[in-house]
Image (cartoon, rainbow, N blue to C red):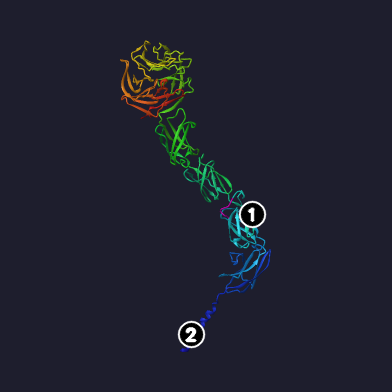
Amino acid sequence: MIRRILIKVLAAWTMISCGEDEVAPRSNPRFSVAYVQDINAKGAEFVANVYDFGSEEILEYGFVYSKGAEPRIGKGEVIKLVGRPENSFKLTGDHSMSKGQIYYVVAFIKTEQSIVYSEPMAFTSLGVEGFVFERIEGGPEVYYGDTLTVFGDRLSTDQSHYEIKINGAEARVTDLAKNSFKIIIPDEMGFGYPFDYDGKLVLSIKILDKRLELNSDLQFYAPVFYAADRESKYEENFSIKGRYLRDPNLTIRYPNYHTELVSNSDTLIVFKALANFGTLEPSFQVYMRGRSYEVDGSVRIEPTEIEPNQHLKIGSIYHHLLIKGTNFNATLPYSNVFVSDVEQEAQQFYVDGMASDEAKVSVYIDVVPSPRFFKVWAFNGGVKSSHYATIENTEPMLPYLRTHSFPFNAAADGRSVTWRDKGIWLADGKISEVDPKNNSGRILKAVDINRGNIASSFAVIHQDVVYFAGKENTISDTPGRFYSYNLNSGILQELPAIPSKASTPRAVFVSGGYLYFGGGFYRDEVDVHKVTEGYKFNLATQTWSTWAKKFPISDYWDFENTFVHKSQVYGLVNEVDDSGYHGTRLMRFDPSREDWTELAKYPYLGYTNGYSAMSLGDAVYVFIGEALVKIDMDSYRKRTISGISLYDRGYTGPPFFFLSEGKIYYAAYNEYLIHQIDPFYFREQ
């Protein structure tokens, strides 16, 4: 029994011993650099001896040399063969050595598991010929990031020995092989001068001490610009789509305006353009990679549109138009263009504020007649908007009619009256008619060959007859001559001379069949003299008699502003004495007393010498003291109308006034222009 157990133990021990013999220990090759010989201008021969090949399969063997004391693959030049070497192997290093430089060389054997290096040996190089370039493969058109393969001989296997530049920019080197290497086209390349303007690449290849400058046939891709696929708003960044668009030095220009590059990629250029675009499809100058490109059709701007059915007001209290719309150019507000149905040269729009959906605009109009209503369109990019805003000018007084072409001097000194919605002007030695409805002026009667102020004294109208008188240097230089002109018959009649010494009356009006002529003044060689007496002229008998009313004299100029309202004569009579003006009273003439009856009293309003009060409805509008005053003839309440300012020459006579179809027409002395004043737009203070 014991014997059988012993036999089994011995058998097991025997089996274990056999298994351990089959697992051989791993061993590395052992070798060394024996010597370096034949050091000359063609290189150096390296020889190594192998003492033990080790236990693993050998894949490659060779040498590594470098300036560093411990050459290694990846840190030196490699020369190698594939397979298992003989007991002694030698290879020649024929590249990448500088003359007089000390190098270190090691032998290496590569197995499946590791790379084993020998101890280094030093040698001094006599230099070798540099690399030999053969060709480049790639292209024929290339772009950033593309790979080029360079073929040649005696190429370095140490990547640190390579310095490759393409158009001045350093390129990355990869995949080093015995007869080739690859380079990646860099992003930061130069174009244009001093490189090829046609986009051909210029390469600089430096390996160790040798450099090669190469003008290649490789063509860099020219940019491709796509047509715009959408419309852009002014407030947005503009974009140009395409291919091969990337350039770190890209600039984009629009003539005479600033553009700012936002981003740039292979397929997209994004930029801001602060420009006044004359078209909705502007052309841009894109400068990239040494060349300039005129880019058309790559940007399309959305038309600016006016919100329909807008009725806006300007003038008086309305200082600006607030026009609603879409895609106004808020990035460059003053580039927004507006047009109207008014003559373009006579109207200017000024942008006072701008948002993409609202324009704050003021308007200057220099056209006659100045329109009460007009239409405004947007005209950005040379394209008229589909819709318009209707503008109402609420200024009460607007330029209406130029008088340069009238057959009489409409700017001469004179007086005016209203007759059948027309103005009857007595000036330039003539009686003339101004018709605002037909925009015309014509001479009714030539009176004075000297073309003087035939109504320098006064002019009033009663039942289609104008009564007037002139003074200094008029009507044959004879003061006090008195005329009537029948507007229906055209008959001019000289009437009995005015008995008063006054050449200009303080008050003149027609009531109860009489023309009243009261007070006034005249000049002689010494001074101005004032008159207290009054006279009245019987229109039927054409005779003068004394008017019992006396007109007090003071040191101040004063006139009674008379007017007719609903067939009754009224007057604005000032309280004045040598101490000054004390007020203005509204009076109604009492024919039975031949004197005024007071209705109301106001602060002093001023005076004017002539016709300047117009009856409209239940009110009378009086131009006095360079202002317009409204008097309600039912309540006698007085209000000043704002926004109206006129030039009144005081004692020498008022401007020309007349009424036509509910509107007042006004022309200043020495001005060839008639204004229309519309009471509908009056604003009371």
Task: Tell whether position 186 is magenta.
Answer: yes
Q: CA distance from mark 2 to mark 1?
A: 82 Å
Q: Residue at x 60, y 67 (%)?
A: 69
Counting other residues with Cα less than 10 Å from the Cα at mark 2, is it few (<14), some (14-19), or many (20 or more)? few
Task: Tell whether position 426 is magenta.
Answer: no
Residue type at mark 2: give it.
Val
Q: Is residue 673 visible?
A: yes
Q: State the quadrant of the C terminus.
A: top left
Q: Position of residue 515 (x, y in %)?
A: 37, 15
Which mark is nearer the camera, 2 or 1?
1
Q: Secondary structure at mark 2?
A: helix
Q: Which residues are magenta?
A: 185-190
Quick check: 26 above or below 377?
below
Residue 100, quarter of the rendered image: bottom right
Quick check: 378 above or below 649?
below
Q: Which residue is mark 2?
A: 9
Q: Secondary structure at mark 1?
A: strand
- Dot 2 or dot 1: first in sequence order is 2
Residue type at mark 1: give it.
Leu
* Front residue (pair 357, 565): 565
Magenta region, mostly helix, strand or loop? loop
Q: Which residue is mark 1?
A: 214
Counting other residues with Cα less than 10 Å from the Cα at mark 1, is it few (<14), some (14-19), or many (20 or more)? few
Q: Is 326 situated left or right of 176 in this image?
A: left
Q: Position of residue 318 (x, y in %)?
A: 40, 34
